[in-house]
Each structure stands twice: as C-alpha cells, then as structure tokens.
Image (cartoon, helix red, strand yellow):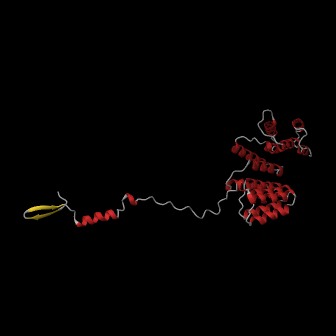
Amino acid sequence: MCNGIETIIDGKTIVDLKPPLNGRRRKRRLRIEPPLSSPRTQSPQPRPPPSQNPNPNAPKLPESVNTLSGNRLNLHNRILTLIRQNDLDEASLFTRHSIYSNCRPTIFTCNAVLAALLRQSRYSDLLSLHRFITQAGVAPNVVTHNLLINAYCDCRKTDTALEHYKQLINDAPFNPSPTTYRILIKGLVDNNKRSFRIPDGVFSLYEELKEKLGVVEDGIVYGSLMKGYFLRGMEKEAMECYAEAVGENSRIRMSAVAFNSVLDALSKNGKFDEAMQLFDRMMAEHNPPWRLTGESWKL
C-alpha cells in the first residue's frame, strides 16, 4: 500500500511519495497551531485571587505586645502617669482623643484606663469608654473581657456577666483565662447568696475550668468554690475543697488573695477553729502577715 500518488508514464508506474497538498498544509498548520488536546495547551488553571472583601463581621485579632513601642509606648506612659496622679478624667479623655489621631493607643493602654476606672468603682465611665473603643474598632483581648465581666459582677448584674461570658466563648478568637472563671465564680457566689440555682452555675464553671486546664493549680478559685458548697449545705464537700487547697502536699498555689478568700469562707460559715488554724499558719509563714489578711476578720 502506497501513501503517495501513482502516475503512469510510458507504461511505467511512478509513485510520487510526497503527501498530498492538503496533507502538507494540515501538518504545517499543526506545527503552527497545536490541537486543543496537545499537552502544551493544558496549562494549569490559575488560582482564584484571594477575597479582597473579608467578612466584616469576623472578630479581629487583638494586637500583640510588640505593638507597644515607639510613639505608642510614649503615649502609653503618658496615660499611665495620669492614672498614677489619679487624674482619670484626663486619662480617659486623652485616650478618646488619641483613638483618631496618627498615634492610636493600643488595647493595653485602653485596658490600663479601664482597670483604673474599675478600681474606683466608676462603672458608668468604664462602660462608656469600653463602648467607645469598641465602636472605634480597637480589638479587645481577654483582659478587656475580664474587666467588663468584673464590672458587671460588681454592679450585681450577674446575668449580663454570664451573657458576656457566653459571647466570649462563642465569638472571640481566643479562650477565656483562669481569671475569667475566678471573676465569674466569685461574682455568682457574692451576688446570689440566697439563690440555690446559682451555686450549680458555680460548679459547672469550675468543671469547665478543670476541663480546659486539666488541674486547677491557682488557689484563688477555692474560696469562692467553698462558699458555693456552703450555700448548698454541702459542708463535707466544702471542707474537702479546703483540704485540697491548703492541706499537706497540696500542689495548689496559694497567693495572699487566695488565702484570704479561703479564710473568709471559713470564718463566715462557722468554721472558726479551722479559720484560726489557717490564720496561725499564715502568721508563721509570713512575718509580718499580709495587710489584706486582717480584712477577712471584719465580719
């Protein structure tokens, strides 16, 4: 079989091996324009560009401590000076004015002012400043949430504090800290001494804290936990909690505030012998005793 063109000349058959003209044109066209199935045309599909419009409702990550430098650190120190001078009105006003300046305060500066307002029980000013920095787009960190929850508990608005805690759990890009649970547990116990529903909330918060940390080594929670047990009439469990906190070979870290909280729980629930023993132990371990220790005996 011959692919060329046969031509008969003088009785002889001559085969022209050149392909037909149409075939040559086709090959030339293929060299110039490869077919669609050619590997050279199968280039990888370009990746879609990243979204230029992220979800505006997504929570912003708080700034790191590294942002507290340069002019922002100078601003932070100036506001701390006003706080030390007890000029909280000027510190709060300075913070507000700086929000929209070319030297925006960090969340650490805002927290310092909020904490100073909390210490002086200026709750309305604290809530007003917190609302202002939130609307200005300053991303809060866990300390900001703790200060707000503490303010709600001090104002006896435990339901609002719990709602804010749930908002922190569901929406914040970070987890609550042990201080968050300490504030909530103490607030629930102190503000609801006549309610039998609230201690259950205290215990559930404590179990949640244990689940997150594995072992609760900070003793500052135990005094409020003992009060919760006493409110439910669970004296045995309260004393087991006391033994776990201050007993021999205990791994619990007991600070001055933690000791005072346990001492307060004992003295206000008829455990005067145990309270005196704990006080004597504190006297022996710390000479002179902490100033806050004497406050627990003001019943």
In the image, 26 versus 61, the foreground residue is: 26
In the visual, does 4 lie left or right of 79? left
Furthest-right residue in view? 298
**Residue 239 screen position, x and y as percent:** 81, 37
In the image, 238 versus 174, the foreground residue is: 174
**Residue 121 screen position, x and y as percent:** 85, 57
User: From where the camera sits, is residue 38 visible?
Assistant: yes
Image quadrant holding the N terminus, namely bottom left
- Residue at image point 72% right, 61% down: 138
**Residue 80 screen position, x and y as percent:** 82, 57
Count of numbered badges drawn on the protein: 0
**Residue 136 screen position, x and y as percent:** 72, 64
Determine which quarter of the picture holds residue 8: bottom left
In the image, 134 versus 10, the foreground residue is: 10
- Residue at image point 80% right, 64% down: 94
In the image, 273 versus 234, the foreground residue is: 273
In the visual, does 62 lie left or right of 52? right
Furthest-left residue in view? 11
Determine which quarter of the picture holds residue 25: bottom left
